[in-house]
Image (cartoon, rainbow, N blue to C red):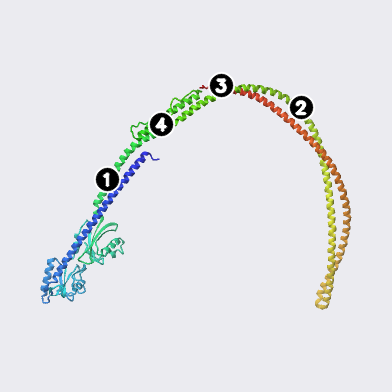
Amino acid sequence: MKSIKCKILTAIILLVSVSLILVGGTSVFLNYNSTMSLLEQIMKESAGLASDRVSKELVAYQNIATEAGSIARLAKPETPIADKKSIIDQRTKTYGFQRGNILDSSGKSIFDGNDYSDREYFKVAMEGSPFISKPIVSKITGELTVIIAAPLWESGVPGTKVVGVVYFVPKETFLNDIMASINISKNSQAYIIDDSGDTVADVSLEAIKNNENIEKMAKTDKSLQELADLHVKMKEGKAGFDTYKIHGVKQILAYEPIKSREGWTLGITAPVKDFMAATTQSVIATVILLTLAMLVSVLIALKVANKISNPIMACTKRLTQLAEGDLKSDIPEITTSDETGILAGATGKIVKDLNDIISDLARQLAGIANGDLTMVSMVTYPGDFAQLQRSLESVFNDLNQTLDQINQAAEQVAAGAEQMSAGAQALSQGTMEQASSIEELSATITEISDKVAGNADISKFANQISKETGSEVQNGNHHMLEMVRAMNEISETSGEIGKIIKTIEDIAFQTNILALNAAVEAARAGQAGKGFAVVADEVRNLAQKSAEAAQNTTALIESAVSAVKNGMETADDTAKSLEVIVEKVGGVTEQINKITDGSVEQADSINQVTQGVDQIASVVQTNSATAEESAATSEELNAQAQMLKSLVEKFQLR
């Protein structure tokens, strides 16, 4: 659990930190944006100035060529070539060109006879317009060459017929020198591209000689892609400013078209870090100031937190000791008049009031322990503790009343116990005399009960034998009836067998007839029916034997039926005799049952009398024991009442 000091420190430091970070971040952000805005303005202006400078240089060179194309002597065929060359050389020297030349209308030099008819500058100039070529490698000298060409007008009158071309070749590095002179930072660089994206001017001649094109190079080197995209914008002929990254380094680029040469655009690029030194210093200074401010804030927050938390911690510690039962330790001394001082005062009052209350309670409880119930509270309990004081006073009052009532009750109990003890002793004596009489009566009844029980057992035995005899006779009669029923079934079955034998005789007769017919048919068949005739003879023999067996069986069955009839008559006579015996045995059994029931009832009655006498004896014995116990209890109760009275007398009542 975090302490209040930690929470205050955390809250203050967090608030100050967030505020300082927001202020510092906003300051850095605004400083950076301001620097970038100023840098954009400067870069645009620098690109515009550089573009104007290049444009003016080109216009100046173009005007020189145009002026030369308006010299009549250079246009006249009759002017000696030496004079023409002298005029060209003079201007070449005057303006610092490398060389100059005059081409006739077929594109051949009038000085050295070389053919330049395939050159773009020749074609454009022959159409009547001056032309500044992109840097090319001369086929003659092998040097990087820019051609400033103009039409040579007939008789030196512009707008008339073009009779040739005058051109001058500036120094190889004249554009590169201009690019090298444009320095806006330590690592800045200026260059010019044409409408195809080729570099036409750069601080490095090799980039021009190698016909460098960033857009084409970006197809194989993806790190140049952002710059290539900006070159596409540069070719649109509009001024602009943008940023890009190349090899992880952020660069800025300002560009503006060159007015005097359509399709050419000048660009100035530089690493952002060249212009961020002041911004970086500002950021570092801001971070340092923020750090210092943070440290100061922490110190101030620590001092404020200590001022707030220390009194609270002291009060918390004292309240914790109070919760653990410590009422004696010192109360923290805090002299401030703010909430912490109020908290300290309240803590002291709580400790003092609880100390007074606990001390008063301890004093009164000690009085109770010593038997003094006359104690009263010596202090006033504040607030809700007043209910405790009232409850304690009520407890004392109730105890006084209760103990007084207990004393009175003890006296009454002692008196009653003496009376009950005397009555219990008299009861015990009478009960002992009753017990002696009951024992004699119980012995007599027990003897009678034993004799009646013996008679009942004899009657039960005779009854059992009579029942068994009757049961056996009934079983014999039942078996006799079953035998008669079986003989009837035999007689009926013999009749059915007779019918079956009659059927067998009929079948034997029919079989015999069929055998005769078969024999007749076999005789008719001749030799082929011999086998069938033999079978027919065998069948006839079997039929005869079946008829004889049926006759014998019929005779035996008739004899058996006659014997069954005689047995049935004898069985009927026997069954009637058994019925008479069963009836007589039933009468004897009924009389014996009555004798048995009477003996049993007598035995039960005597048993009940015996049980009643036993219960009376038990009750008498119990009464005797109870009387003795009551006497003993009365004496013990009297002793307890006396002891209770002596205990109550130890308390001092109001």
Disc 2/disc 4 C-alpha distance (Å):
86 Å
Q: Nearer the viewer, mark 2 or mark 4?
A: 4
Residue 646: image tag: 3
Residue at screen point 83% across, 50% down? 478
Within 10 Å of disc 4 (Cα), the crowding (few <14, some 14-19, many 20+) is: some
| Horizontal side, residue 358 vs residue 179: left or right | right
* Element class at badge 4: helix
Looking at marks 4 and 3 on the same chain, the residue that comes earlier in the sequence is marked by 4
Disc 1/disc 4 C-alpha distance (Å):
49 Å
Residue at screen point 53% across, 25% down? 401
Q: Which residue is mark 1?
A: 289
For the residues labelled 3 and 1, say whether their Cβ atoms are less than 8 Å apart. Answer: no
Disc 2/disc 1 C-alpha distance (Å):
126 Å
Residue 229 in the image, given as x and y percentages of width and height: 29, 62
Looking at marks 2 and 3 on the same chain, the residue that comes earlier in the sequence is marked by 2
Q: Nearer the viewer, mark 1 or mark 4?
A: 4
For the residues labelled 2 and 1, say whether their Cβ atoms are less than 8 Å apart. Answer: no
Q: Amino acid at mark 3?
A: Ser
| Horizontal side, residue 166 vs residue 522: left or right | left
| Horizontal side, residue 638 vs residue 216: left or right | right
Within 10 Å of disc 3 (Cα), the crowding (few <14, some 14-19, many 20+) is: few
Q: Is residue 232 above or below residue 644?
A: below
Q: Which residue is mark 2?
A: 440
Disc 3/disc 1 C-alpha distance (Å):
90 Å
The answer to whether residue 81 is seen in the rendering is yes
Residue 544 in the image, given as x and y percentages of width and height: 86, 68
Q: Which residue is mark 4?
A: 350
Q: Amino acid at mark 4?
A: Ile
Q: Is residue 161 above or below residue 96?
A: below
Disc 4/disc 3 C-alpha distance (Å):
44 Å
Within 10 Å of disc 1 (Cα), the crowding (few <14, some 14-19, many 20+) is: some
- Residue nearer the viewer, 206 or 24: 24
